[in-house]
């Protein structure tokens, strides 16, 4: 934790926001789910979105990716406004999503799943490096994607967006439903990815896990960002956070 | 020596070959339907009309422009596929978010319009299209006579079917298609142009129908109803094989052609209905079809 805290100050000190979100509103069909999301993520940071079920965390990630049916406000990636863009164009700016349901394709084997997302820029991890990080995937590369265990599927869902050259990773509850030992592995992976220079927005319910990997936490409630807590000040704000999360 | 239940081998083999040829058309056509249904969720009822269009375009190329069969095999799928692309872009694309029924109704209407137009201009008596000279004649196999063109139809169909299967199941492009069939939103979020892929896939499925039409032109008479007669059986084939299953469409297509041929030998009265009887049985026992991934 102390390591994460020192990282915060070194990375947060300088540099413009990689991703800046202002007054973001979003809809699923007729239903208005985001009412004004504001936050920013700097290059190299790990930032979490914390909040109760239904607060709008997943919707925020989908809105960044352009998947919600309607969006308003502003989402800029390296200064480029994306609010009018199609998801496939947003992807090309270097944003990649690891969805909550993992989205492993059952008609593709592990290797095909891994190789599916096209390269959008240089600087992604090599396939060798990815298999080094996730040795299980190499062993099972001919298996059907959905025949993997839950943990392996999660690894695969993360692994496949590392190849593409995307620098901003949106990870939606990567620890959901996984055994503690796998959760630890995923935590180690996320810290490793930060070292490799990835910027990560992490949606989490498990705030202990969030605290172990993140630089800063944004609290989302009823479709709005209501607070920001640097990881270093988490202990001091624990009561406030409990109140937000209702735990 | 080869006599089986009192049936002379010439008759048996002859019907078997006929079954295999019908099966070739069932396979290529149901393959196109399966590819389209898999990605677009559209039951392409105009498939028979597009097959007829293939035969007519081949006939027109020869009649008006003097372009021969072999060039037609290449040009017709491109032309017919292009009409499919236009149809997708203008109309089908607006229906993806609606129930299957809308796509079915639209393509059914398109089929009626195309068939009506051709009936109006060319009548229903059928136009002759000669077997290309390189494939006239036949081989005496000892136990039966194999017309060269019919052998070619089977070989060409097998190549096209397995080529298509290979591309879809074993290549990177195929992986995009399979993934987009499962979750087009996520595939789009990876930066892949899914609408373009859908448009080209429809064009390809329709091109397969056009290709089958060229193959059919020299053996069946080229007439506006040729597709309407065939497509009902082809739909039964697709249902038996499992909607959207590539290998299912191929194997069931050839298999049912053969079964139909054998029925003509052993119980001629049943040959017209045997495929539908099998369909009813399959629907009772395995509603998702023999090769269907459970829907």
Image (cartoon, coloured by chain):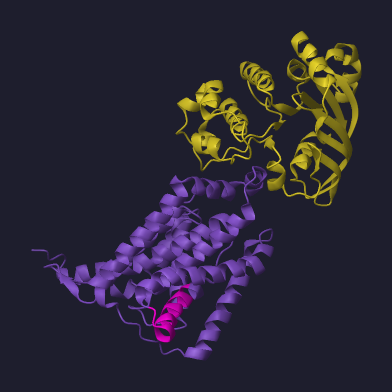
The quadrant in which the N terminus of chain A is found is: top right
Chain identity for the colour purple used in the image: B
> Residue A212: image x %, image y %?
74, 15
Q: Is residue B145 left or right of residue B181?
A: left
Can you see residue A239? yes
> Residue A239: image x %, image y %?
90, 15
Q: Quadrant of residue A245?
A: top right
The quadrant in which the C terminus of chain A is found is: top right
Q: Quadrant of residue B265?
A: bottom left
Q: Quadrant of residue A171?
A: top right
> Residue B139: image x %, image y %?
17, 70
* Residue A63 is a magenta residue: no
* Colour of chain A in the image: yellow
* Residue B54 is a magenta residue: yes
Which residue does the image show at 42% across and 53% down from the upper left? B165
Q: Nearer the viewer, residue A50 or A3?
A: A3
Which residue does the image show at 35% across and 72% down from the upper left? B70
Q: Is residue B242 left or right of residue B9?
A: right
> Residue B271: image x %, image y %?
33, 72
Q: Nearer the viewer, residue A140 or A85?
A: A85
Residue at the limit of the structure toward the left, as seen here: B1
* In the depicted structure, whether residue B117 falls above or below residue B180: below
Q: Is residue A17 left or right of residue B281?
A: right
Q: Which span is picked out in magenta?
A: B51-67
């Amino acid at each position: 934790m102390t390591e994460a805290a020192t990282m915060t100050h070194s990375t947060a000190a300088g540099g413009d926001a990689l991703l800046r979100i202002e007054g973001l509103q979003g809809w699923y069909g007729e239903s208005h789910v985001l009412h004004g999301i504001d936050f920013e993520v700097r290059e190299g940071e790990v930032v979490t979105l914390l909040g109760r079920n239904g607060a709008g965390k997943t919707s925020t990630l989908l809105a960044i990716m352009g998947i919600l049916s309607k969006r308003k406000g502003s989402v800029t990636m390296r200064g480029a406004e994306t609010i009018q863009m199609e998801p496939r164009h947003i992807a090309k700016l270097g944003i990649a999503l690891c969805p909550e349901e993992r989205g492993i394709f059952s008609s593709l084997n592990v290797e095909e799943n891994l190789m599916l997302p096209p390269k959008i820029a240089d600087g992604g991890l090599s396939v060798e490096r990815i298999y080094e990080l996730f040795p299980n995937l190499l062993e099972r590369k001919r298996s059907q994607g959905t025949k993997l265990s839950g943990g392996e599927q999660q690894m695969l869902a993360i692994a496949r967006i590392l190849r593409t050259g995307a620098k901003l990773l949106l990870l939606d509850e990567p620890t959901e439903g996984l055994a503690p030992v796998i959760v630890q592995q995923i935590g180690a992976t996320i810290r490793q990815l930060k070292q490799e220079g990835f910027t990560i927005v992490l949606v989490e319910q498990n705030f202990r896990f969030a605290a172990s990997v993140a630089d800063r936490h944004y609290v989302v409630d009823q479709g709005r960002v209501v607070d920001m807590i640097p990881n270093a000040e988490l202990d001091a704000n624990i009561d406030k956070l409990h109140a937000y999360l209702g735990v | 020596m080869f006599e089986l239940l009192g049936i002379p081998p010439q008759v048996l083999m002859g019907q078997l070959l006929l079954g295999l040829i019908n099966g070739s058309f069932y396979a290529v056509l149901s393959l196109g339907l399966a590819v389209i249904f898999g990605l677009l969720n559209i039951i392409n009822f105009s498939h028979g009309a597009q097959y007829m269009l293939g035969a007519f375009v081949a006939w027109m190329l020869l009649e008006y422009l003097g372009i021969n069969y072999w060039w037609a095999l290449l040009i017709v799928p491109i032309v017919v596929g292009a009409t499919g692309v236009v149809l997708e872009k203008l109309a089908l694309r607006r229906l993806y978010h609606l129930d299957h029924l809308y796509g079915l109704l639209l393509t059914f209407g398109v089929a009626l319009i195309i068939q009506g137009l051709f009936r109006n201009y060319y009548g229903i008596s059928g136009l002759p299209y000669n077997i290309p000279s390189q494939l006239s004649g036949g081989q005496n196999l000892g136990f039966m006579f194999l017309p060269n063109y019919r052998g070619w139809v089977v070989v060409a169909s097998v190549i096209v079917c397995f080529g298509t299967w290979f591309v879809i199941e074993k290549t990177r492009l195929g992986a995009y298609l399979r993934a987009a069939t499962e979750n087009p939103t996520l595939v789009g979020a990876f930066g892949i142009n899914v609408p373009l892929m859908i448009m080209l896939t429809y064009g390809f499925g329709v091109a397969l129908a056009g290709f089958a039409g060229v193959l059919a032109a020299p053996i069946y008479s080229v007439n506006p109803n040729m597709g309407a007669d065939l497509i009902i059986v082809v739909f039964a084939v697709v249902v038996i094989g499992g909607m959207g299953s590539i290998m299912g469409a191929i194997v069931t297509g050839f298999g049912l052609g053969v079964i139909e041929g054998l029925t003509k030998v052993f119980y001629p009265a049943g040959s017209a209905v045997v495929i539908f009887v099998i369909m009813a049985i399959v629907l009772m026992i395995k509603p998702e079809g023999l090769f269907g991934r459970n829907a």
